[in-house]
Image (cartoon, rainbow, N blue to C red):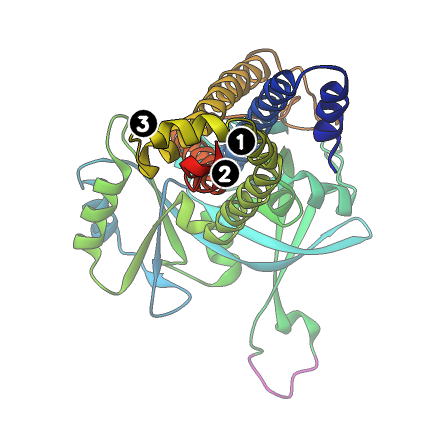
């Protein structure tokens, strides 16, 4: 026997049966309200986390990314790049060469992702979310600089204020002679000056170092080849429309991915978790709705003679069922409205004032992010109404089977 039913039962022992049913109905309404409020709050938190992940990735990734379907790299001639830049909606086109490389700083070594970008990389609004230290510059041709993830800088113990020690970059190559024993023929070597750190998300912080594309092209012997092109869409333009224009221009040999498609797996994981949380809380709400079943069952027992009188006066079974179903609907609707309003207020307060914090001083956001989506309110309401209907159906069916002989 659940706690709410026990409380109502104790109340029944000291009051009339009518008061017992009233108390049980109110407890049912409160249970529905609390369950609905919890459902709205949890779904809004998941929406906030999803939006936060999108924002963090957008600080490092491009709005649209062009890659080759046929191989790791593709030839990017100047005229071809200019044609892409002139496509309607394209504001900034950044060339990218990306590959793994070995980095050495003093006596420390670390394998990370070297990403060479053209000079207009910062014009795409990168690192707007997150933290940065130092000068966000890629340097010059004579003195190229590196913008490093904070995790990479930690692994290598990089000191930005030290102008004496530089970052060495090693990339493997095929030796000129198969019988060569000269180690220098097995790799290309380059020198970068550490210029800045960035901190966005652990995946990026621990694995990426940005450098000028000219430096990376020479180190990797890429020439005019590129591994990707990153596109910033003009303000006011629809990203999907620009994506369609790029696909039409590039043909079937290239893929064009938006931010969500670049990280489809993690976003899909968040959506699946949100779905399972919704189902779990809906199940808990269904358990709480047993109070509706109890209250309507007691009402059907108490009003048994009244129902028989209605039948004797010519009432049909459908009328009696509707009476009890509407009684259950009133309880469920009242609880749902209260829960939706309370859930909205809690989420609004959290979004505006951030009362519930993450408890992590170094986090990008101080409080749990929330984002209210009206579709969540809609499906929560549908879930509550469906649960209320099923909880009310059995008592309504029993009440409709009373006969005039029961008087």
Query: Between 94 and 27, which is closer to the camera in this rendering?
Result: 27
- Residue 277: x and y, percent? 58, 43
The residue lying toward the viewer, choosing from 381 and 207, is 381
Q: How many marks?
A: 3
Q: Is residue 123 visible?
A: no
Judging by the rendered image, the residue that carries numbered circle 2 is: 395
Looking at marks 3 and 1 on the same chain, the residue that comes earlier in the sequence is marked by 1
The first of marks 3 and 2 along the sequence is: 3
Q: Is residue 147 left or right of residue 399?
A: right
Q: Look at the numbered discs 2 and 1 and tell me whether their residues touch, using CB distance below 8 Å.
A: yes
Q: For the residue labelled by badge 2, is the local secondary structure a helix, a strand or a loop?
A: helix
Q: Residue 36, position in %: x, y?
A: 54, 28
Q: Is residue 169 above or below residue 334?
A: below
Q: Which residue is mark 1?
A: 296
What is the quadrant of residue 400 in the picture? top left
Q: Secondary structure at mark 3?
A: loop
Name the residue rendered at 23%, 31% in the picture.
Answer: 237
Q: Which residue is mark 3?
A: 313
Would you call the spot at circle 1 few (<14 residues within 10 Å), some (14-19), or many (20 or more)?
Answer: many
Identity of the residue drawn at 36% across and 32% down: 311
Q: Between disc 2 and disc 1, whose residue precedes? A: 1
User: Which residue appears at 72% of the width and 55% of the height?
Assistant: 110
Observer able to see residue 302: yes
Magenta extent: 176-181
């Amino acid at each position: 026997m659940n706690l709410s039913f026990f409380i109502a039962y104790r109340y029944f022992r000291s009051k009339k049966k009518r008061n017992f049913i009233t108390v049980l109905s109110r407890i049912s309404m409160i249970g529905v309200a609390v369950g609905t409020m919890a459902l709205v709050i949890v779904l809004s938190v998941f929406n906030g986390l999803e939006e936060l992940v999108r924002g963090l990735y957008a600080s490092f990734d491009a709005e649209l990314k062009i890659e080759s379907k046929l191989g790791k790299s593709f030839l990017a001639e100047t005229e071809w790049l200019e044609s892409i830049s002139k496509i309607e909606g394209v504001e900034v086109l950044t060339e990218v060469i990306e590959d793994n490389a070995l980095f050495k700083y003093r006596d420390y070594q670390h394998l990370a992702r070297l990403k060479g970008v053209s000079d207009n990389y910062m014009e795409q609004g990168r690192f707007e979310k997150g933290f940065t230290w130092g000068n966000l510059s890629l340097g010059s041709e004579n003195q190229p600089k590196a913008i490093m993830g904070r995790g990479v800088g930690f692994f290598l113990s990089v000191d930005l204020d030290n102008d004496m020690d530089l970052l060495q970059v090693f990339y493997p190559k095929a030796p000129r002679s198969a019988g060569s024993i000269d180690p220098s023929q097995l790799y290309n070597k380059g020198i970068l000056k550490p210029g800045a750190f960035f901190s966005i998300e652990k995946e990026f912080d621990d694995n990426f170092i940005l450098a000028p594309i000219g430096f990376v092209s020479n180190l990797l012997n890429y020439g005019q080849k590129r591994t990707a092109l990153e596109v910033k869409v003009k303000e006011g333009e629809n990203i999907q429309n620009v994506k369609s224009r790029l696909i039409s221009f590039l043909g079937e040999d290239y893929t064009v991915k938006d931010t969500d498609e670049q990280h489809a797996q993690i976003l899909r994981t968040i959506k699946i978790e949100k779905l399972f949380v919704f189902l779990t809380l809906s199940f808990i709400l269904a358990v709480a709705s047993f109070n509706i079943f109890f209250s309507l069952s007691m009402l059907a027992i108490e009003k048994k003679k009244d129902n028989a009188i209605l039948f004797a006066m010519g009432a049909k079974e459908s009328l009696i069922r509707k009476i009890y179903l509407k009684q259950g609907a009133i309880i469920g609707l009242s609880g749902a409205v209260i829960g939706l309003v309370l859930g909205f207020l809690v989420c609004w307060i959290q979004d505006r004032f951030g009362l519930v914090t993450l408890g992590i001083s170094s986090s990008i956001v101080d409080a749990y992010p929330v984002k209210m989506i009206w579709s969540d309110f809609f499906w929560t309401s549908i879930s509550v109404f469906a649960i209320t209907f099923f909880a009310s159906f059995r008592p309504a069916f029993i009440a409709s089977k009373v006969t005039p002989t029961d008087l």
